[in-house]
Every structure is written in C-alpha cells, then in structure tokens.
Amino acid sequence: MSERVALVTGGIGGLGTEICKFLARSGRRVIAADLGSRAERLAEFHGEIAEFADRIVFEPINVGDFDDCSSAIKRVETQYGPVEILVNAAGITRDTTLRKMSPQQWADVLHINLDGVFNTCRNVIEGMSERGFGRIVNISSVNGQTGQFGQTNYSAAKAGMHGLTMALAREVARKGVTVNSVSPGYCNTAMVAAIPENVRNQIVAGIPVGRLGEPSEIARVVDFLCAEESGFITGANIPVNGGYFMDF
C-alpha cells in the first residue's frame, strides 16, 4: 500500500470520483481537484466518498488557469506532501459541427481539455523528476482516435493530449516518471447522458460488447497505471471502449 499523494483533476465528476475511490483503496492520499463553484455536485460528492474519511479531500482548482494550478498544487504539497501521481480527468464539451462552431467554442474546449493538461503537468513534472518517481495518466477519449461528428474541437484536444503524453514520456522516462493516456469509450456518465437518446442508442448499437462502460472500468485501468509496479509502461494509450474502436 502506497501513501503517495495523488491529484485528480475533474475529481468530482462521475469518472473522476471513481478514479479517486480506486486510488484511495490502493492506499493513496487522494486530492479531488475541481471547480469550487459546483456546490450541489460537491455536496453529492462528499456523500459518495464518506466511507473514505480523510483519504479523499477536495481542493478547488481551475485547470484553465496556470497560476491557479500552481497555487493549488503548492497548497496540496504544503499540507499533504509532494504530488507523485497526477490524473488529468477534467474536460468539457461544446459540440457542434465545424461550420457552425464559434471561435469561442473551439477555444473553450482546447483551453480546458488540452491547455489544462499542460498547466497541471508543468507544475508537477520538475518535482517528480527530482524525486525519481511519478505517475501521470491523461484521460483522453476514443473520439480522439476516431474523430466524431460535431466534435472537431473535442477530438482535436483529446488527440493532442496523447501527443503531449508521448512527448513528455520520452522527456522523463529516465527520471522514473511514466506518462500514459487512457482513452475511454462511451460510459455511464453525465456527459454521455446528455447525448440525445436516439443518438445514444445508435452508439450503443455500434459497441461490440453491447453496452455502455462503467466509470469503475476506466478507474481500474488508471489505478493499474499508477501502481509502483507499472514503471515499464510509458507513452502508451490504453483503450477502454468495449471494442468500439480496435487497432494495434
């Protein structure tokens, strides 16, 4: 059981919450980092993690703001110790076809989903490298691999996330730091629930296993990549999509 500190951005979302739980069960001190303005969801989150007592704590963060990320990570490290595990699960959508997409809709998604990964990684990578240990897992998406109608912004950001993952993995591989991405398929989350039912049914019909994934199935893979024993896996993208997209 490791007492390492893990920071999970988007930590109070459906997927983020499950990741926090899995990491806590593996003995980590987990910091669920998310926007502090989501009062109703934050109250629900505290109820969902009640069994973990003080092993999971909330920390407000705006991943789109580099200085705010720096300040939040400094607060965490002062109170709990160095961040040695980072999971980037924060993300938004602003779906529409490119011919209807505004520059703001493009910029918003790239800013949170891709710039946010830079903002957090940049603020932990030096410490991880100096200490000789680190685990970074970036939550990408199957749509970053396949593209998706109405998601040029989201697909671009998620594909870019894995490009960042591979490049950073090369930079820090000899420092004991691994950097990987996980590409979930369609799962039972609020983001997928917001898809119109007829479209969602078409998506499920195209998934070979015949169902949506569960957040716990993604979280289990993240926990595996964060393990001490996973040090020979880096620069990889792990698909967890029920066979929706297969390659080698």
Image: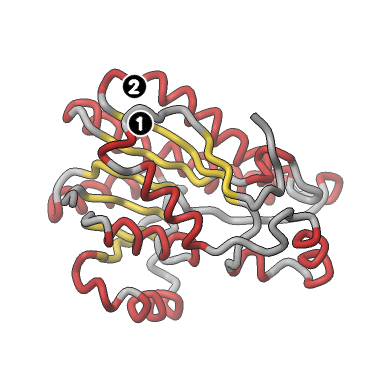
In x, y percent, where is residue 139? 50, 46
Assess whether mark 2 and mark 1 are in contact (beta carbons under 8 angstroms).
yes
- Distance from Cα at disc 1 to Cα at disc 2: 6 Å
Q: Nearer the viewer, residue 215 or 30?
A: 215
Q: Name the disc covering residue 173, or none.
A: 2
Q: Is residue 27 above or below residue 167?
A: below
- Say which of 89 and 119 sits in front: 89
Which kind of residue does numbered mark 1 sit on? Answer: Thr
Please count the marks in the image. Answer: 2
| Picture coordinates of residue 163, whole percent (x, y) | 55, 28
Q: Amino acid at mark 2?
A: Ala
Give the image location of residue 40, x and y in percent.
44, 80
Left or right: 123, with 233 as reference point: left
Q: How is the image coloured?
A: secondary structure
Look at the numbered disc 2 and give the secondary structure of its residue. Answer: helix
Q: Nearer the viewer, residue 21 or 104?
A: 21
**Mark 1 or mark 2: which comes first in sequence?**
2
Q: Considering only vertical position in the picture, is 51 above or below 183?
A: below
Which residue, given by chain and number where applicable, does mark 1 sit on? 178
